[in-house]
Image (tube, rainbow, N blue to C red):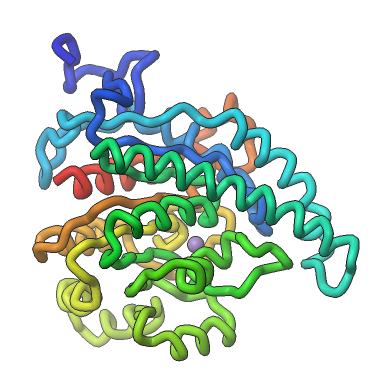
Amino acid sequence: MKTFDPNAAALKDSGIFGLPFSIDEAELVLVPVPWEVTTSYGRGTAQGPQAVLQASKQIDLFDLDLGNFFEAGIAMLDESKDVQRWNKEASFLAQEIIAEGGVDANPDLQEIAQKVNQYSVQLNEYVYTQTKNLLDQGKRVGVLGGDHSTPFGAISAFLEKYPDMGILHFDAHADLRDTFEGFEYSHASIMHNVIEKTPLKKLVQVGIRDFCEEEFEYIKKNNQRIVTFFDARLAEQKLNGIQWSTLCDEIISHLPKEVYVSFDIDGLDPRFCPHTGTPVPGGIDLREAFYLIKKVAESGRKIIGFDLNEVSPGDVVLSEIADPAAEWDANVGARLLYKLCGWTLR
Ligand SMILES: [Mn+2]
């Protein structure tokens, strides 16, 4: 740290954001999860952590709101070779089901889906164990996906330490499907699994604009635990002259004192994430997202941790990431990741 110059260009062998911290030295540790077994549309988000790591080195560290918060130490674990292998094996199995549009009543496909589910359970245990170990050491933790199924184990671990926490969920999708295409741990079911399998008391969703009627009914049925700010309604209110600041206050009023942020990058306007797996027109602006997160912190609530997922450089090999079109998603993702680290370390 003594020889580290935050104003200089990042060194080649530096860590995330060009920082020099070891895991031991870092107050905040990122857990990369290169996983996209159940993604059904565009692929590439398993390469998200590596692409974000590369893009993160060009970020200027000084932050107008938070100053030199990086000095607390931020580091990212190495990607697990096991997770990389499970992702390959399970993706191969899952593709057969995805190509058929789901398992339906086909017993052969049901058997394959069971195998994929077992891989997902292993993945969840891995993320849970990593997160719990780090939280037990007193560290702050962020998960970097991978698809949106990746943080389930992390959310479970956070809930053990912070049983009264709520989740602020940015997304284009409600992610409340009860198994999707036969996959119990689909990226499209993350919040359904959180509601059904954990004691989470409050889920506050923002930017939602792609959901089925079953999910809409599920939100109504669980209205004590789920509050959804649909993108269409937020956009309408803005068009009627209601300020984003006022809307943020309303969103925040539903959150408890401790807030975990689950950020699916496709919650943003797709111009910020054109290669994400399931982009949807509309959505919130990056500045609006930053402002909402800042207001959460300034409301006296504590951001205790986060995940950032569905950042994708597109279905390219990493050596081609120099392609500016493919680099853009990781560039935005790295900046969003840095802000999330900053408000968590505050
Ligand atoms: Mn999602």
Relative to 82, say whether 41 is above or below: below
Name the one closer to the observer, 11 or 239: 11
Name the one closer to the observer, 282 or 261: 261
Q: How far across and down, in percent of the image, does residue 109 sit?
A: 85, 61
Relative to 257, say whether 339 is above or below: above
Relative to 265, say whether 326 is above or below: above
**Quadrant location of the N terminus?**
top left
Give the side of residue 136 with respect to residue 282, left or right.
Answer: left
Give the side of residue 195 with respect to residue 277, left or right.
Answer: left
Q: Is residue 260 visible?
A: yes
Q: How many marks?
A: 0
Q: Residue at x 22, y 29 (%)?
A: 73
Q: Residue at x 38, y 58 (%)?
A: 262
Q: How far across and down, in percent of the image, does residue 127 sit?
A: 48, 44
Q: Residue at x 29, y 54 (%)?
A: 161
Q: How far across and down, in percent of the image, does residue 280 sit?
A: 52, 66
Q: Quadrant of residue 250?
A: bottom left
Q: Quadrant of residue 219?
A: bottom left
Give the side of residue 50 with respect to residue 301, left or right.
Answer: right
Q: Residue at x 38, y 14 (%)?
A: 12
Give the side of residue 181 with respect to residue 152, left or right.
Answer: right
Q: How far across and down, in percent of the image, does residue 251 sit?
A: 24, 75
